[in-house]
Amino acid sequence: MITSAIPKLEPELMDVIRLFSGAEQLNISHEAERDGAYFINRFCVDGQAYEFRHTPQTQDDFFSFEDKSLFKRYAKLALYELLCKHFQTSLPWGSLTGIRPTRLAYTEVESGNPFEPLFNELGVSEENTALVRRVLDGQKGIYGYGKGNCDLFVSLPFCPTKCVYCSFVTAPIDKTRSYLPDYLAALDKELRAAQPLIGNLRSVYIGGGTPFALGVEELRAVFEAVAPLRTNGCEYTVEAGRPDVFTKEKLDLCKEYGVTRICINAQSFCDETLRAIGRSHTAMQVEEAFALAKPYGFTVNCDLIAGLTGESVEEFCKSVDKAISLDPENITVHTLCLKKGARLKEEVSALSGERLGSMIAYSRKALTAAGYEPYYLYRQKYMAGAHENVGWCKKGTASVYNVDVMEECADNLAVGANAVSKKLFLARGTRKSGEEYYKAGRIERMGSPKDIPTYLNKIEKIIAEKEALFTE
């Protein structure tokens, strides 16, 4: 529990507290002030007083940020340093709690400064600083701002069963199939209305849920609705998902409509783990899905999750090795996260991060040795071990959609239930050299209702509000 003399800082400070097991039981008070170039933070923890003084490392830092941003930065850093001392530990991302470490790195780089000194100041490990450097390198040729750049997301919130870690508003399709005809009609209506709102379409992503949970003709209806918007041959991803819904007919359909990428979400190659998380398929079926997809020439992504229920370090490492042996172009390594709405969240109050460091370290070493490079990363609150999710790819196979979404450097027009659209309003920046460049200004978001009945009932309002947002 924390109370601050600057109440607006309390949520930010709580984010730091949640990184440390046991810290929420401490009674902490906080106050802050600025004395010239110094930001001073004072804490009282169970009667013990502490004071921290920090100053920006460069004058550029000092003059380019508003005081409120620096107050937040150094209040969080001071609390992080205090809790590290109290619990005799340190964390791989230091005092960073945001979901996009690369955003902070790009802010420094685009201002003409290296990002490494700031990351070092904030306590980020050398390994993670190097990881961010590799990610920025992996995004070259994709990352960047441009007027009219847009990605299209289509939400199909239907699954065969719901996994214990899943927080999405989905339900087994046998319980929601009655909504499908109306849902597909609403999607068609939304996509027709979206066509004039899209400028330079960079990618299309059909996600869920598990899109392959739909039947062939239901999928065809979605592809038909998307087709008039995708006329430039841009990247086209379908999150095929679980192998228990894979069929040759669905893969044929993807090929017919120009899909370029699919995702096979293995999560683990351990049968015991798959049963524990609520999957109704085996690891062998995942391998069979890979074999079925191989002749089509899709760029394939395989998802793995570190920290799944009861899985040992050895079992996770075997899953990494198996994924590499199947030779997908992309492998994404997620860290298990306790999300609101997931059954796992209801069953346990905290996740042990003890084994995760070894899992993450092994995945980085093995994937690098196999020729993969990291090209995007993001973090989430309540993530076990304060780690991250990382997308790895072979050279030349990075996903435009993933980079654009993670770095928020293009509009995202999203249709369907529980879809969140983002409109990016660009601003101009000036580098030290005098060169002007586009950068993120403000971002406005619009979320559609999460449950299908409410989405269907409000479809006309959703279309009108989205048109207003994207024509502003």
Image (cartoon, helix red, strand yellow):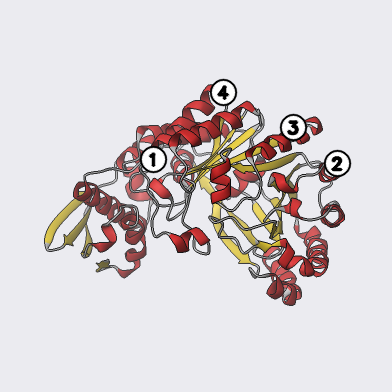
- Residue 378: x and y in percent read 50, 46
The answer to which of 326 and 183 lies nearer the viewer is 326
Location of residue 94 by image quarter? top left
Residue appearing at x 29%, y 50% in the figure: 77
Of pointers 3 and 2, the one earlier in the residue sequence: 2
Residue 176 in sight: yes
The answer to which of 144 and 82 lies nearer the viewer is 82
Residues at marks 2 and 4, CA–CA distance in whole angstroms = 30 Å
* Residue carrying label 4: 370
Identified by mark 2, the residue type is Asp
Q: Residues within 10 Å of mark 2 (few under 14, many from 20)?
A: few
Residue 199 in sight: no
* Residue carrying label 3: 291
In this picture, residue 52 sits left or right of residue 344: left
* Residue carrying label 1: 355
**Considering the numbered disc 2 on the image, is that residue within a helix, a strand or a loop?**
helix
Q: Residues within 10 Å of mark 1 (few under 14, many from 20)?
A: some
Residue appearing at x 60%, y 35% in the figure: 331
Residues at marks 1 and 3, CA–CA distance in whole angstroms = 32 Å
Q: Which residue reaches farthest bottom? A: 457
In this picture, residue 130 sits left or right of residue 370: left
Of pointers 4 and 1, the one earlier in the residue sequence: 1
Residues at marks 3 and 2, CA–CA distance in whole angstroms = 14 Å
Q: Contact (CB < 8 A) between labels 2 and 4?
A: no
Q: In front of the other: label 1 or label 2?
A: 1
Of pointers 2 and 4, the one earlier in the residue sequence: 2
The answer to which of 19 and 354 lies nearer the viewer is 354
